[in-house]
């Protein structure tokens, strides 16, 4: 069996250049050539996982099937490649150090002095090689978070240096840098890239391939200059220009021969360039779409990355419904009874977003009331679903003080309550209901018709649940509990069948939507929102 090959993706100059998108694109292109790949992310921060991080700090928290809270880049890996990631695909400095400290406490090191080199670096190398050894992948792509020069990344870079030395042609480094355009001088500047490569060389790593992020097309002369100054082959200097969509990046990388350069560097057979048929069809659909569907996201985080997977899932669904997606963020902290009509005006459908804590929840409840009473297609996800339940309990069941135990410990009508096994938990991190759980759908329900199957499996990230004591009252008054976990009997989905589309899910369907397999719930929601918008326009005429 051929040895697993390792591709290390690093970044320089500034953060947020899109290492995750480049890693996912490399994975996609190698997959298209028939290779079995996986992608992992190493984050240099000391948190055990991003589960307790504020979304303003780090964007959304993505959840793997086995319940690991991870960086949002894992969402890109899954959406681009269709692979399912696990906790082995995500690692932080915190987890590396914890593992080494736990071993030291157990006496595994036989009294040795524990040091960054070799103990921390060996643990990093062990985790990089773990996936290749266990599942015999052809390629393991490892993205190192942060930027070259960060103090935190030093042990990771040392581990890569050692691995490149040990593995020879079986390891390459793809380094992503930035080429800024100085408007005043009217020039593109390569100096930041040269400094970044110098910094990488100073820790003993010579990049094999350079990907240059740029807002302007780079002439060949700039690529030649970079190749000369950075000891990189000319055909291994690739530019990543700003594109209309992140989904154009794999095609752009393929056109410039990024996958060919990687295979050549690893002494591998190159063969014909794959056609990327279904991917290009998706892009063609995106380009051809002229009509627009308007969806409002009601949430409290005014930051694109906070709802990244939801935004991408809506975008996939719009493309397959031959529309462009226009998403408007509507801050739930600013929604009140007297302005809700104005705030939600012009939206064909509304998503009530997930989240944690008290801030902005009353606005979500007001929004849920407005969309329910005005029959606007509404999709509540996790906390969004819980707000739909609370609104219904207050307005239809007449429990004016109905609430979630999360928001009001003493509420007499706790229609959303904490699970018994969660009650005495003092640690916040990694202790929720996390990862994929089974759900059985009620035959004849709207969700059953959407999924076209009785048994589904979806990913969760929450601590509070629908209180089954109230189930009969909800059912009798028109809100149906149509999906439940077969083991715990917990309610997973509620819907109001006599409305156009009013569905809440306790789980996060956005984690399962990929470019080539859009999620059925998002597909149906967007389709209904489009129809709703068209009817509203017909009325205006």
Image (tube, helix red, strand yellow):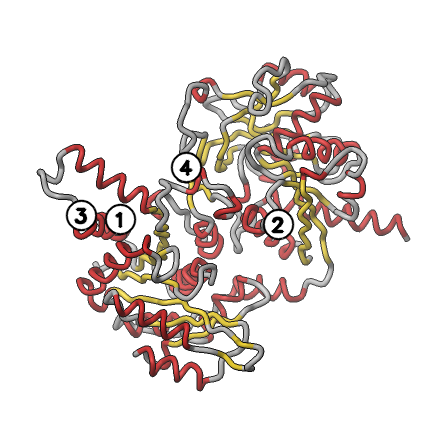
Relative image position of residue 25 (x, y in whole percent) = 44, 63
Residue pointed to by mark 3: 115
Q: Are marks 1 and 3 in contact (CB under 8 Å)?
A: no
First-in-chain label (3 vs 2): 3
Q: Closest to the observer: 75 or 484?
A: 75
> What is the distance, in whole Å, between disc 1 and disc 3 at their CAs?
17 Å
Image side of residue 487 versus residue 233, left or right: right
Query: Of circles 4 and 3, which is in front?
Result: 3
Residue pointed to by mark 2: 314
Q: Is residue 154 above or below residue 454?
A: below
For the residue labelled by badge 4, is the local secondary structure a helix, a strand or a loop? loop
Residue pointed to by mark 1: 127
Q: Looking at the image, which residue is at 54% across and 26% down? A: 484
Q: Quadrant of the N terminus?
A: bottom left
Q: Closest to the observer: 349 or 178?
A: 178
Residue pointed to by mark 4: 67
> What is the distance, in whole Å, between disc 4 and disc 2 at their CAs?
23 Å
Q: Quadrant of residue 356?
A: top right
Question: Crowding near pointer 2: few (<14 within 10 Å), some, many (20+)?
Answer: many
For the residue labelled by badge 3, is the local secondary structure a helix, a strand or a loop? loop
Q: Closest to the observer: 522 or 7?
A: 7
Relative image position of residue 108 (x, y in whole percent) = 13, 37
First-in-chain label (4 vs 3): 4
């Amino acid at each position: 069996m051929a040895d697993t090959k390792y591709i290390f993706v690093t970044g320089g100059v500034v953060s947020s250049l899109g290492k995750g998108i480049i890693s996912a694109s490399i994975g996609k292109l190698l997959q298209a050539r028939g290779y079995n790949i996986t992608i992992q992310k190493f984050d240099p921060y000391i948190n055990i996982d991003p589960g307790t991080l504020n979304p303003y700090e780090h964007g959304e928290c993505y959840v793997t099937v086995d319940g690991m809270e991870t960086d949002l880049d894992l969402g890109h890996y899954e959406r681009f490649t269709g692979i399912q990631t696990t906790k082995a695909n995500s690692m932080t400095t915190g987890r590396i150090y914890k593992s080494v400290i736990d071993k030291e406490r157990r006496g595994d090191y036989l009294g040795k002095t524990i040091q960054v080199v070799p103990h921390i670096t060996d643990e990093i190398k062990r985790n990089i090689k773990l996936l290749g050894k266990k599942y015999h992948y052809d390629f393991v792509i490892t993205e190192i978070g942060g930027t070259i020069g960060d103090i935190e990344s030093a042990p990771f870079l040392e581990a890569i240096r050692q691995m490149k030395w040990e593995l020879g042609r079986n390891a390459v480094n793809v380094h992503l840098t930035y080429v800024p355009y100085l408007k005043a001088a009217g020039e593109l500047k390569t100096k930041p890239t040269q400094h970044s490569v110098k910094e990488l060389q100073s820790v003993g790593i010579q990049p094999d391939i350079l990907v240059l992020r740029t807002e302007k097309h780079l002439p060949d002369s700039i690529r030649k200059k970079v190749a000369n100054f950075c000891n990189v082959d000319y055909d291994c200097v690739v530019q990543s220009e700003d594109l209309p969509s992140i989904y154009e990046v794999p095609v752009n990388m393929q056109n410039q021969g990024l996958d060919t350069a990687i295979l050549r560097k690893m002494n591998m057979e190159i063969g014909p360039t794959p056609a990327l048929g279904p991917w290009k069809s998706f892009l063609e659909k995106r380009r051809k779409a002229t009509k627009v569907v308007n969806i409002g996201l009601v949430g409290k985080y005014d930051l694109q990355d906070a709802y990244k997977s939801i935004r991408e899932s809506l975008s996939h669904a719009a493309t397959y419904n031959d529309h462009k997606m226009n998403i408007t963020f509507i801050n739930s902290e600013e929604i009140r009874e007297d302005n809700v009509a104005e705030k939600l005006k012009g939206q064909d459908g509304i998503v009530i977003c997930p989240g944690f804590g008290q801030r902005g929840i009353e606005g979500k409840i007001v929004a849920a009331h407005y969309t329910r009473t005005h029959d606007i297609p509404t999709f509540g996800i996790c906390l969004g679903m819980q707000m739909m339940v609370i609104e219904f309990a207050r307005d239809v069941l007449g429990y004016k003080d109905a609430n979630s135990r999360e928001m009001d410990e003493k509420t007499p009508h706790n229609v959303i309550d904490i699970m018994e096994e969660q009650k005495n938990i003092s640690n916040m991190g990694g202790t929720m209901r996390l990862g994929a759980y089974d759900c059985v759908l009620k035959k004849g329900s709207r969700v059953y018709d959407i999924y076209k199957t009785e048994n589904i499996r979806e990913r969760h990230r929450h601590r509070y649940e629908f209180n089954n004591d109230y189930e009969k009252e909800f059912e009798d008054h028109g809100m149906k509990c149509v999906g439940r976990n077969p083991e715990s009997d917990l309610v997973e989905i509620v819907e109001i069948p006599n409305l156009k589309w009013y569905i809440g899910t306790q789980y996060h369907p956005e984690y399962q939507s990929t470019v080539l397999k859009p999620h059925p719930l998002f597909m149906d929601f967007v389709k209904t929102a489009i129809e709703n918008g068209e009817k509203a326009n017909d009325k205006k005429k």
